[in-house]
Amino acid sequence: MKAPRLRVAAIAHSVAGAAHIRQMRPCQDAFRVESTGEGVAVAVAVADGHGSSRHAAEGATFAVQTATRTLADLHAALGADAGTGAYRAQLEDAVGRRLVLAWQDVVQRHGSIDGIKRRPGEPDLEVTHRYGTTLSAALATPDVVACLALGDGATLWVSPEDEVLRPLGDDAHAFADQTSSLCTAGAWRALRATAWTPPAEGGLLLMMSDGYVNSYPDDAALDAVARDYARLVRARGLDAVGAALRGFLRQVSIRGCGDDVSLALIHFAPLEDAR
Amino acid sequence: MSVDGNLPLEMELPGGPLSARPLDFIFLLDASSSMDGAKIQSLNQAVEAALPAMRDVARDNPNAAVRVRAIQFNSGAYWHIPTPTPVEQVAWTPLSASGSTAMGRALSMCAAQLRTPPMPDRALPPVLVLISDGAPTDDFRAGLNALMAEPWGKKAVRIAIAIGEGADLAVLRAFMGHPELEPLRANNAETLVQCVRWASTAVLQAASAPPSRALGAPAPSGNVALPAPPPPASAADVW
């Protein structure tokens, strides 16, 4: 086993949107951070349940649970020394399909236990559509960043030189209120995934729900957000940013688009710099 | 810690200025000669009367930045309010009526403004309200095709109000493209006020926070789930 050169740590949070609060609707975003690989790795996920789905909040919660478990299992199966190529191959093929089917299985079972019935005037939907959600998730080890996304959330990487990259691109199908979703048949075909080796100087991965994305006018403004988080983490440490994260997200929702807002940060710090 | 939003005083929110999502509301108004007299006067009054209620809706939905524009059409089509104007700043200049009914041209002009850019990617679905008392005298189908060729045109909440008995309902239905909702009928000044008010408040409210949904999932009729429209025109018809 190689000696780790980076320390990996993560924080995440979700807050109910300002518009949701005004309309007395619950937060339908979810997040999860799970340590794995004896603490040297983390699996992180954020999900954004569709406002049109009656059980969106549960769907998002099941999504982050399923994703972090699936990624932790992948890490365990591949071992600590697997290269990015092995992760990429798994993510693009079996893992994506396994994740989607596992989530659909969980919501089908929840739906049958919950005895979901159609309400008057409600369209006849597949059970999974009542739990519809997007998902962004990542597995981070000192040697690998493996991430995947389905739907209109954003995944940004800030390099040590403050360059902002979008390793997964955008959801090509998302427009206005429509997005790719875990709930659609064959959803794994819309899943975007990649893996790479983090540089020795570290970096910051951000995963955010569309409530964060839509609170800024364009990609350039969102890049500035990502760079500021990277600077803040370097200057103050991840824990200090974590303590402020809920307040940040509330501000974004109040002064931005009003939707639920989620953000996860995964920090790769050179061991000598790690706080 | 500050009280509002629990931000630590010494830590500023990362990034630059935040922005509410733009919601474009565009009136497409018939100002042809058949509208001359009481109809155009009532239309001006109805739009002007709707503005305070629109401002109230906008105030109650601060996360949507409502921007108003208006096109008038007669022998040609012209921007009456050419730039997207925050609803708080809209002052209505009355229209006068003359000429023919270039409705198709008005739709084409609207379509050009729904292209991205100038429309931002992260906008809310626009609301288009077409009000007419007659039939198009130009190529309506070409205008509608241009509108529907734009993703934001297709995604727009499109409402039509027919003034009087001479309005071409088939054309207005085609504009709306709504499987359930019919064009609203205004046969007197009072119902015109009600119809314009509904379109500019209830519809605006519904469009200001549309719930997200999965691709391929059954969509609400007409892009956004709309509240019930006002009851049909009363018997006291004057037009």
Image (cartoon, coloured by chain):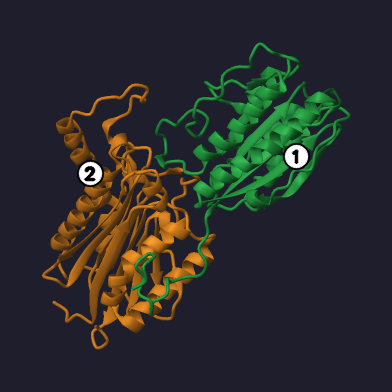
Chain colours: A orange, B green
Residue that badge 2 annotates:
A103
The residue located at (74%, 26%) in the rendering is B132
Q: Amino acid at mark 1?
A: Ile
Q: State which quadrant residue B216 falls in.
A: top left
Instruction: Using residue A156 as the reference point, say whether residue B129 is left or right of it.
Output: right
Badges 2 and 1, same chain: no
Mark 1 surroundings: few (<14), some (14-19) or many (≥20) residues within 10 A: many
Q: Residue furthest top?
A: B235
Query: Is residue A34 in view from this perspective?
Result: yes
Instruction: Using residue A115 as the reference point, say whether residue A215 is left or right of it.
Output: right
Q: Nearer the viewer, residue B203 or B179?
A: B203
Q: CA distance from mark 2 to mark 1?
A: 49 Å
- Seen in the picture, residue A66 relative to A116 is either above or below; the reply is below
Query: Is residue A197 in view from this perspective?
Result: no
Q: State which quadrant residue A79 falls in.
A: bottom left
> Which mark, residue B71?
1
The residue located at (24%, 68%) in the rendering is A83
Instruction: Using residue B51 as the reference point, say whether residue A17 is left or right of it.
Output: left
Q: State which quadrant residue B28 falls in.
A: top right
Where does the image place residue A256, in percent across and percent down from the top left?
47, 58
Disc 2 or disc 1, which is closer to the eye?
1
The chain that hosts pointer 1 is B
Q: Amino acid at mark 2?
A: Trp
Classify mark 1: helix, strand or loop. Answer: strand
